[in-house]
Amino acid sequence: MKLLLAHWLTLGGHLGLLILNLAWHAWLAPSVYFPVSLVVMVTAAPLLLPLPGLLQGRPRSHLWAAFLSLLYFTHGVGEAVANPEQRWLGIAEIALSLILFFAATLYARWTAAAAPRDAGA
């Protein structure tokens, strides 16, 4: 039960970050300095890399998604502090990245704990 909850929270945080970044950089506050397509590609494309493994429930993909979420956490903190007009977007990014980080880490940990141990190793 807790493994399933961690998996669904991971997917929710991951897809939430993907949707937030697409909406943020394409519609809500597009960049005036760079083309929107470039900004969306740089911010949203890395989230697509672990997605197949997350959907299949692979623990290693969950760990990589957790590592990746730290970049989005850092970006969210920077935006929340430096940009008062977009502070709410930065806070949303912080919240989603923390959900992703903790849920993915717990999923990987609980999956490893449930795996049978190899007695010969």
Image: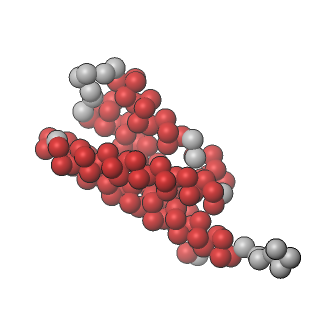
Which quadrant would residue 83 be assigned to in this image?
Answer: top left
Q: Position of residue 52 (x, y in %)?
A: 63, 46
> Is residue 1 in view?
yes
Residue toward you, 67 or 55: 67
Residue toward you, 108 or 18: 108
Q: Position of residue 33 (x, y in %)?
A: 25, 22
Judged from this view, the residue extending furthest toward the left is 84
Quadrant containing the N terminus is bottom right
Task: Kindly identify the residue that appears in the image at 64 percent across and 50 percent down.
Answer: 53
Q: Position of residue 27 (x, y in %)?
A: 29, 31
Residue 10 falls left or right of residue 109: left
Residue 34 falls left or right of residue 84: right
Q: Position of residue 40 (x, y in %)?
A: 40, 30
Task: Kindly identify the residue that appears in the image at 33 percent across and 49 percent down.
Answer: 74
Whether 49 is drawn above or below 70: the answer is: above
Task: Kindly identify the residue that appears in the image at 26 percent across and 35 percent down.
Answer: 28
Which quadrant would residue 34 be assigned to in this image?
Answer: top left
